[in-house]
Amino acid sequence: MNVISVVTKPFPGQKPGTSGLRKKVKLFSQPGYLESFVQSIFDNLPDRQGKTLVLGGDGRYFNDVAIQIILRMAAAAGFGRVLVGQNGILSTPAASAVIRKRGAFGGIILSASHNPGGADGDFGIKYNLGNGGPANEGFTDAVYQRTQDISVYRQVAAEDIDLGRLGETRIGEMPVSVIDPVADYAALLESLFDFGRIANLLARPGFRMRFDAMHAVNGPYAHAILEDRLGAPAGTVVNGTPLPDFGGGHPDPNPVYAADLVAALADPKSGLSFGAASDGDGDRNMIVGRGFIVSPSDSLAVLAANHQLIPAYALGLAGVARSMPTSCALDRVAAELGIACYETPTGWKYFGNLLDAGKATLCGEESAGTGSNHVREKDGLWAVLYWLNIVAVREQPVEQIVREHWRRFGRNVYARHDYEGLQTAQAETLFAELRQKLPALAGSIVAGTRIKAADDFCYIDPVDGSRSERQGVRVILEDGSRIVFRMSGTGTEGATVRLYLERYEPDPARHEIPAGEALVSLAALAEKVARIAEISGRKVPDVIS
Ligand code: VG1
Ligand code: CO
């Protein structure tokens, strides 16, 4: 095999964040940038010789170019085979499913998820282990170390291969299988849910669903599963053709970026009763009822509380897990079920050990990512099918299901405020001040409210004992209300600050009050504590979800 060694240099800042390395396409496409990072991954996989690697991405701009580069490098690195999604496409949960089903050594997923695409947008890459889940911090730190002293990368001299044709081909001497990106994943989902019942629901005259794929990767998956297998009428899936720039949109399923879907469900003339959307790489979801948006933290709690209705989970949940900023609605369900509820830092990589060890069956985050032990990633279409299965069995609209849940468990009123693209220096000042204040905050009275505890979340993994520090500042009030501050680890421009607000409301008569209203005083308290508006000059957040 004709392996060429190319001299390269360390590029600054190749440090993976919450979910892999995300940077502007302009940075990623400069000579040697992607290559240095990929070689740094391979250099940390000493046992890769002869093994199988899975490769695919969300189809964004530069996906096709990057796939060909990585194939040439995988061949030079001695992999035995690469399984690549047709046209270079694999949603994040589908990649996880393929890695697990085919017993692959690991996988590379090309995605910047919800970040905008196109030539001026973002690109991203992450490595997943043989369990199908994102590599842990130990691994990503080691990759980052390697990027800082790398001097050479290796590739085979070979032409681009045709990724449009399914079947076997080669690059250099290494076999490459171009696989159907949907098949393994769809079969897995079919094994978890009651497809017969969901199909009946979709055929009911009074039930109309819309799935907005936001021009991102889930289009082909939603077409195949919802329309072809489950018989939803053609047109159920909208924006279903993946585009390299996501049609100029922002494939983040929240009330701001999926405003069209929310408006359609709010309009009685649309006849729609169930709406759903997913993000750039298909791992997150939004569920919308008629004129009613389900808060992601509530969605997770509802899934857990209704597990007995789902074939795959009917026998019980081993435990559940949520990220720290996610509301405690899940904890209340776990307490009633008598199972453990784990609290992890933000990012799916922290759920992997709990899932592998059989400690948790369902996991989720407030950012609309939910999933289970069927894969090791969050899974957008899985959540949509789970909800459809619940609606099919309970024969109730989405809003009623959530309101009944609140009546039973109380309502964890919740909101996340995102301040996007602040100047990095401002955000750093904000967090430096906040962290400095922490020791004095606990026990003090701010705006007439006593603060019970204040800390910077530190996680000790219950399976391998690893420590992750500085995972978000928590301020807990005497009545159990919480304010959390975090710096986003997925953005590529400036710094995005997230503020999370949560207050428990047991009184059903007060469940009608909109979250914004119910959280006004908590938001004011947050401003007193952290001075986000004052420091940044931003009067209101860019996104409230
Ligand atoms: C955000 C979300 C987090 C999620 C991560 C990756 O991270 O808050 O819950 O796991 O995105 O999701 P951050 O660091 O920006 O808050 V995805 O679907 O964009 O890969
Ligand atoms: Co995503």
Image (cartoon, rainbow, N blue to C red):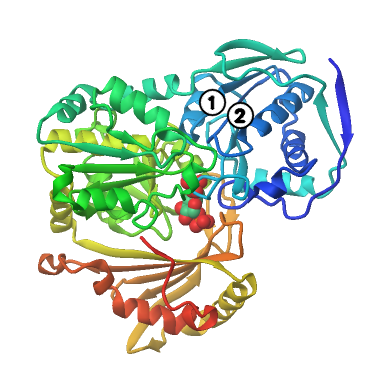
Q: Nearer the viewer, residue 444 or 217?
A: 217
Where 501 sits versus 56, above or below? below
The residue lying at 28 percent from left, 31 percent from top is 235
Q: Position of residue 207 (x, y in %)?
A: 14, 36
The disc label shown at residue 290, or none: none
Which callout, 1 or 2, points at the residue further toward the start of the chain?
1
Give SS at disc 2: strand
Give SS at disc 1: helix
- Amino acid residing under circle 1: Ile
The answer to whether one can see residue 457 in this image is yes
- Amino acid residing under circle 2: Gly
Q: Nearer the viewer, residue 440 or 521?
A: 521
Residue topped by disc 2: 106
Is residue 68 rendered to the left or right of residue 219?
right
- Quadrant location, the C terminus: bottom left
Q: Position of residue 451 (x, y in %)?
A: 38, 81
Q: Nearer the viewer, residue 339 or 429?
A: 429
Where 505 sits versus 305, above or below? below
Q: Position of residue 165 (x, y in %)?
A: 57, 14
Toward which corner of the image does residue 167 lie, by quadrant?
Answer: top right
Is residue 332 rendered to the left or right of residue 7?
left
The residue lying at 53 percent from left, 43 percent from top is 245
Toward which corner of the image does residue 501 lie, by quadrant?
Answer: bottom left
Residue lying farthest to the top in this orientation: 168
The residue lying at 74 percent from left, 37 percent from top is 44
The disc label shown at residue 99, or none: 1
> How packed is label 1: few (under 14 Cα within 10 Å), some, or many (20 or more)?
many
Where 294 sits versus 535, above or below? above
The answer to whether one can see residue 478 in this image is no
Contact between labelled residues 2 and 1, with CB atoms less than 8 Å apart:
yes
Tell me the CA gap for discs 1 and 2: 6 Å
